[in-house]
Image: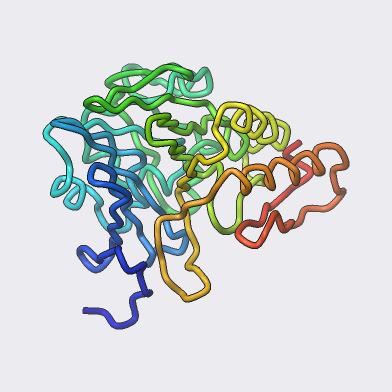
Amino acid sequence: MDDNRPLLAPDAVWEEDWFALETLDADTLAIGEPLYFQCNWSYLISDGDHSLLFDTGCGQVPISPVVNRHRRAGLKVLPSHMHYDHLGGIGAFDPVIIADLPVLRACVDGEVLVPTEDLFLGTKHGLAVPRISVTEWVKPQSWIDVGTRRLQVLHTPGHSPDSISLWEPARKRLFAADFLYRGALYAQVPGASLRAYYASCQMLLELLPGDAAIFGAHGQPDAQGRSMAPELGMSDLADLAAMLERLVTSPPAEAGEFKVNARMNLAYSPERP
């Protein structure tokens, strides 16, 4: 056992000395990578004989053995967006569902999806662009059935043009990926848009109830140094919307990082209006 591993929340456990597993409920497993510099979190959503994996890890250590130990018989995979740290293990899975967005349809080469570098951002890190065999395209606002669980696919651009979130009304949970999480939010990378980010915030504030829980794809340790599934709430979403409104209305001339609240900062660039 590596004594240099970070602390975990009391109900989280290590697996393979890399992944932190936290049970959100009997059918929902958060799979974290606290040793990775971006502290990624993916989500395994299950019911009956079915599972859906939302994101496939950073790829530094294969996520598939962990998923295969905890999945149900019928597994589908859905990436939240094409950034490299969310596609690391995608080649090990089939079938793969992809959000039916024009920006992604434009990346289809023959029968496979090959994201552009502006969508992938990984070649500068020495990573090969994946070639993704798409089994099914799902349109924004449509529903995915995982056993008796129903999750709505929401297009939530801002961090990237292809970003999606999953909303589960029955459990009042939004799986928000890179749209909202604890730590530094990126609105300065290629494809980011402050106006789109703000519009997505407004849409979510109108759609979600006030007691919705929001689970993101990254999470810095808490004040006690413990890593845990990055849960936020509607007040955090409202704080982000207020910051984005301020930046859209009066954009600063220089790039910078702005404090949203005690849990989040927003990295901004005037190149991403």
The answer to which quarter of the image holds residue 256 is: bottom right
Pick the front one: 271 or 236:
236
Q: Is residue 65 above or below residue 140?
A: below
Residue found at x 11% / y 34%: 73
- The location of residue 66, given as percent across then percent down, is 19, 52
Image quadrant holding the C terminus, namely top right
Image point 47% across, 42% down: which residue?
Answer: 177
Where is residue 196? Give x, y as percent. Answer: 67, 30
Of residues 107 and 147, the one nearer the viewer is 147
Q: How many marks?
A: 0
On-image quarter of the N terminus: bottom left
Q: Residue at x 28, y 44 (%)?
A: 28
For residue 37, side relative to residue 197 (left or right)? left
Q: Quadrant of residue 90?
A: top left
How are the colours assigned in the image? rainbow
Q: Is residue 67 left or right of residue 120?
A: left
Q: Position of residue 166 (x, y in %)?
A: 43, 32
Task: Tell me: residue 219, above or below residue 208.
Answer: below
At x 46%, y 55%, the residue is: 230
Residue found at the very far bottom of the displayed protein: 3
115 is higher (above) or lower (below) than 20: above
